[in-house]
Amino acid sequence: MNETSGNGSSHASLRTGGALELQGVEAGYGESIILRGVSLQVRPGQVVCLMGRNGVGKTTLMKTIMGLLRAKKGTIRYAGTDYTAKTPDIRAKAGIGYVPQGRDIFPQLTVEENLRLGLEAADTKLRNAGIPESVFAQFPVLRDMLRRKGGDLSGGQQQQLAIARALVAEPTLLLLDEPMEGIQPSIVMDIERVIESIKASKRMGVLLVEQSLTFASAIADYSYVLDKGAIVAEGSSASLSEEQVRRHLAV
Ligand SMILES: Nc1ncnc2c1ncn2[C@@H]1O[C@H](COP(=O)(O)OP(=O)(O)OP(=O)(O)O)[C@@H](O)[C@H]1O
């Protein structure tokens, strides 16, 4: 048995998850306000897309949900609990996984060490069981590269590692910030497949920042369009018209 795969079985997480609910969230940097009263919901098992042009505040919103930025106003609730004033590690332990934009992996650490860091957010049972086999089933390339330094991987492989690192803790809600950005087409398809399998498993909700309207409308149960820090359009894929979205996405 592979020493990193623990008991080789898929862990049954004790966490059940729940809905993410933002109500009137205001946040920014220093004195500048970027998010202006954002309200949104991600229900368990849903894939929700967040769209909007560059600089409208998508990453700021992800950081605020994760607690890396403080909400100046409004509330952030997850599974019925108010996390507005809680630290990122408490939010991670509650089941919120975050894959930042730009594949924020540790280049000097090996793939295995990067994955083990992801386990820090996991409960004791998961941590003791080691890196779950399911992660290698989703990203076979990582198994072959366990001893390589993260920085030696291609951009697409680093993105897979970043997603895998979030998945090892078996989050119940996954925040994915533009996972397809700057990735070669073959890897884009791999990552799309992973998001599709997450959706099919119905085991976690996903909030996905995605610029491709085609992919967003194919995968998302619901989408929000952000413009200048405010939600300007929202709806199910069927109800949100392409024209409505393009108006806000056009540069
Ligand atoms: N650390 C920071 N300090 C100050 N201002 C920032 C900081 N990070 C982002 N901003 C500003 O906040 C605004 C929103 O940026 P944000 O990164 O959230 O946008 P975005 O929609 O994610 O864009 P992109 O698609 O380009 O990543 C921008 O005007 C940006 O310049």
Image (cartoon, rainbow, N blue to C red):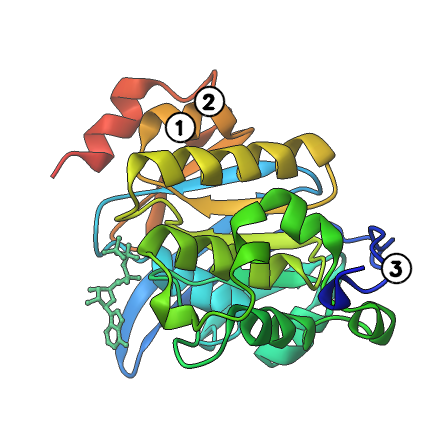
Residue 186 appears in which quarter of the rendering? top left
- Residue appearing at x 47%, y 76% in the figure: 68
Q: Are marks 1 and 2 in contact (CB under 8 Å)?
A: yes
Sequence-first disc among 1 and 3 = 3
- Residue appearing at x 64%, y 74% in the figure: 116
Q: Nearer the viewer, residue 49 or 86?
A: 49
Can residue 115 be seen from the camera position used here? yes
Residue 5 appears in which quarter of the rendering? bottom right
Q: CA distance from mark 1 to mark 3?
A: 32 Å
Sequence-first disc among 2 and 3 = 3
Q: Position of residue 127 (x, y in %)?
A: 78, 73
Q: Position of residue 218 (x, y in %)?
A: 46, 22
Left or right of residue 53: residue 218: right
Q: CA distance from mark 2 to mark 3?
A: 31 Å
Residue holding disc 3: 14
Residue holding disc 2: 218
| Callout 3 amino acid | Leu
Q: Position of residue 44 (x, y in %)?
A: 71, 43
Q: Secondary structure at mark 3?
A: loop
Left or right of residue 147: residue 203: right
| Callout 2 amino acid | Ala
Q: Nearer the viewer, residue 37 or 170?
A: 170
Q: Secondary structure at mark 1?
A: helix
**Label 3 crowd bin: few (<14), some (14–19), many (20+), radius 10 Å:** few
| Callout 1 amino acid | Phe
**Quadrant (top left/top right/bottom left/bottom right) for the N terminus:** bottom right
Residue holding disc 1: 215
Q: CA distance from mark 1 to mark 2?
A: 5 Å
Q: Secondary structure at mark 2?
A: helix
Q: Nearer the viewer, residue 14 or 37?
A: 14
